[in-house]
Image (cartoon, grey):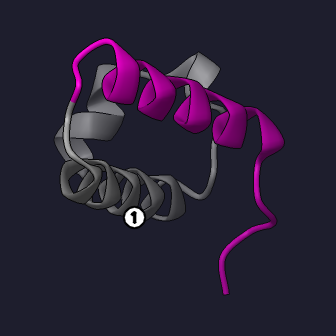
């Protein structure tokens, strides 16, 4: 089972998706795929804070 949800990451994901929806005007289908991928990455990374993101995380994923 994965670690408990990281509230900071959830806020960052929500902010990102709001930006994508309103600024970039992407479709709901695209937003659904993006949130699924973000959640998958978050779980793979053991819910480490996105604030401490390192490029090696993305490369490893």
Q: Up-down: is 17 above or below 27? A: above
Q: Secondary structure at mark 1?
A: helix
Residue extending farthest top? 23
Location of residue 20 in the rendering, given as x and y in whole percent from the top left corner: 33, 25
Q: Residue at x 59, y 58 (%)?
A: 46
Q: Up-down: is 13 above or below 60? A: above
Location of residue 29 in the rendering, given as x and y in whole percent from the top left corner: 21, 59
Image: magenta residue range: 1-25
The overriding secondary structure of the stretch rendered in magenta is: helix
Q: Which residue is mark 1?
A: 40
Magenta stretch contains residue 21: yes
Q: Residue at x 39, y 50 (%)?
A: 38
Q: Residue at x 76, y 59 (%)?
A: 5
Identify which residue, 6 or 11, lies in the foreground: 11
Identify which residue, 24 or 34, lies in the foreground: 24
Location of residue 21 in the rendering, given as x and y in whole percent from the top left corner: 35, 29
Location of residue 15 in the rendering, given as x and y in whole percent from the top left corner: 57, 24
Image side of residue 24 versus residue 52, left or right: left
Q: Quadrant of the N terminus?
A: bottom right
């Amino acid at each position: 089972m994965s670690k408990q949800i990281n509230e900071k990451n959830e806020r960052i994901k929500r902010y990102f998706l709001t930006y994508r929806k309103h600024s970039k005007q992407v479709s709901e289908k695209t937003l659904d795929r993006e949130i699924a991928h973000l959640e998958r990455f978050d779980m793979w990374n053991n819910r480490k804070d996105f604030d401490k993101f390192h490029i090696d995380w993305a490369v490893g994923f």
